[in-house]
Amino acid sequence: MKNDWILDVLADLKSYAQMNALPKLADQLAEVADTAAIELTSMERKARPVHGERRILGDNTGKARIR
């Protein structure tokens, strides 16, 4: 996963929350990390070519890039 750095950041934030008596925040960060992992996995699956085809992905600017 090329964007898995976000999972490390969320884990660090969760650890901080746990060490500083912020249990509700720690719980929410755990849920956010789970959601992020699911979405990152989904993004990678969508970006993979199927049977040698090239996939065209759009971005927020309306431009397309080929992968």
Image (cartoon, rainbow, N blue to C red):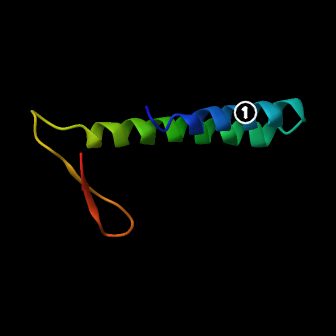
Q: Position of residue 45 (x, y in %)?
A: 29, 37
Classify the position of the C terminus by image quarter. top left
Closer to us: 50 or 39: 50
Classify residue 41 as left or right of residue 27.
left
Q: Residue 8 falls in which quadrant of the image?
A: top right
Q: Residue 2 falls in which quadrant of the image?
A: top left
The residue drawn where x is 66% and y is 38% is 10
Closer to us: 13 or 3: 3
Classify residue 63 as left or right of residue 11.
left
Classify the position of the N terminus by image quarter. top left
Q: How busy is the neighbourhood of tag 1: few (under 14 within 10 Å), some, or many (20 plus)?
A: few
The residue drawn where x is 71% and y is 37% is 27
Q: Position of residue 21 (x, y in %)?
A: 90, 35
Q: Residue 57 falls in which quadrant of the image?
A: bottom left
The answer to whether 64 is drawn above or below residue 24 in the figure is below
Task: Read off the residue under disc 1.
Answer: 12
Amino acid carrying label 1: it is Asp
Q: Position of residue 51 (x, y in %)?
A: 9, 33
| Helix, strand or loop status at disc 1 | helix
